[in-house]
Image (cartoon, coloured by chain):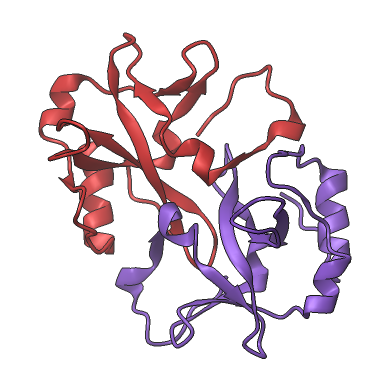
Chain colours: A purple, B red
C-alpha cells in the first residue's frame, strides 16, 4: 500500500478497524467496494491481503475479494483506496462468499497473485 | 506473534476483524483485556502493535494499550492471546483513552518498546 506525499512519518501507521469499511475505487473513480478486513501473517505480522467486499444487497450475498496489500493506494481526495482494476476484471477475480473463510494456502495465494499479474512473493 | 505447533501452514494468516475482540491473558491466566485493533504500517503492511483495551465499564472510560506485535502468542486452549505481563505492569504502561488516537511517532514507539524492555526495531 502506498501513501500520499503529504502524509508525514508520524502517520506511518493506520488502525485495522479504520481500514475496515473504507471504500475502494478504481482510477476512473468507480466505487468497487469496501475493505472487509486485512489478512495478517500471525508470526511476522505482515498484512498480505486487504479483502474487498463487493456485491449483494445490505451485505447479503456479497463476495470477498482478496487483494494483495501492495495493490492498494490511499487517496486522500477520494477518502478511500484506489486499486488499478476494472469492474470487468472483478467478474473473474478470485473471491469467496462473505460467510466463508477459505484457507489461504500458497496455492490460493499463487492463484490470487497470478490473476492480478503479480509474482507470488516468498513469505 | 508466535503460534502453536498444531497450527498448520494453511492457517498462517488471520483476519484483522478476528484479532479484534480477542481476549488477552497473562501466563497466570488472568484476563487482561481484549484486542481493540492492530496498528499497521501503511506502506510495508507490517503489524507493529496489537492495541489492548482494558478497564472501564461497558467500554466507557477504558484505555488502549499498544503492545508490540511480537509480545503476543495465541493460546488455542485459552482461546486468546497470552502476553507476559502482570496486572501491576499495566498500571504504569503506555496508554491512551479509547477516544484518542495518538500519533505513533518514533518517540512514542521507543517509549512503548522501552517500557516493555524491548529494543525499538528499525522499521
User: At 72% from the left edge and 51% from the top edge, which residue is drawn?
Assistant: A61
Image position, residue A57 (x, y; %): 65, 59
Image position, residue B6 (x, y; %): 68, 17
- A113 or B60: nearer the viewer: B60
Q: Can you see residue A52? A: yes
- State left or right for residue B36 relative to residue B62: right
- State left or right for residue B21 relative to residue A80: left
Image position, residue B93 (x, y; %): 16, 37
* The quadrant where residue B30 appears: top left
User: At 34% from the left edge and 78% from the top edge, which residue is drawn?
Assistant: A8
User: At 73% from the left edge and 54% from the top edge, which residue is drawn?
Assistant: A63
Q: Is residue A111 above or below residue B89?
A: below
Total residue callouts: 0
Q: Can you see residue B117? A: no
User: At 57% from the left edge and 37% from the top edge, which residue is drawn?
Assistant: A43
- State left or right for residue A106 relative to residue A53: right
Q: Is residue B38 above or below residue B86?
A: below
Image quadrant occupied by the N terminus of chain A = bottom right
- State left or right for residue A81 relative to residue B83: right
- B1 or A54: nearer the viewer: A54
Q: Looking at this rendering, what residue extends furthest in the front direction? A: A57
* The quadrant where residue A53 appears: bottom right
Q: Is residue B71 above or below residue B29?
A: below
Image position, residue A117 (x, y; %): 86, 71
Amino acid at each position: 500500500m502506498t501513501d500520499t506525499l503529504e502524509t508525514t512519518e508520524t502517520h506511518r501507521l493506520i488502525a485495522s478497524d479504520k481500514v475496515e469499511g473504507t471504500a475502494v475505487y478504481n482510477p476512473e473513480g468507480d466505487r468497487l467496494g469496501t475493505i472487509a478486513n486485512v489478512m495478517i501473517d500471525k508470526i511476522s505480522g505482515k498484512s498480505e491481503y486487504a479483502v474487498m467486499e463487493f456485491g449483494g444487497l445490505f451485505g447479503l450475498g456479497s463476495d470477498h475479494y482478496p487483494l494483495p496489500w501492495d495493490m492498494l493506494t490511499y487517496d486522500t481526495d477520494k477518502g478511500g483506496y484506489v486499486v488499478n482494476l476494472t469492474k470487468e476484471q472483478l467478474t473473474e477475480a478470485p473471491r469467496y462468499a462473505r460467510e466463508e473463510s477459505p484457507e489461504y494456502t500458497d496455492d490460493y495465494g499463487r492463484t490470487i497473485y497470478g490473476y492480478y499479474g503479480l509474482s507470488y512473493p516468498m513469505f
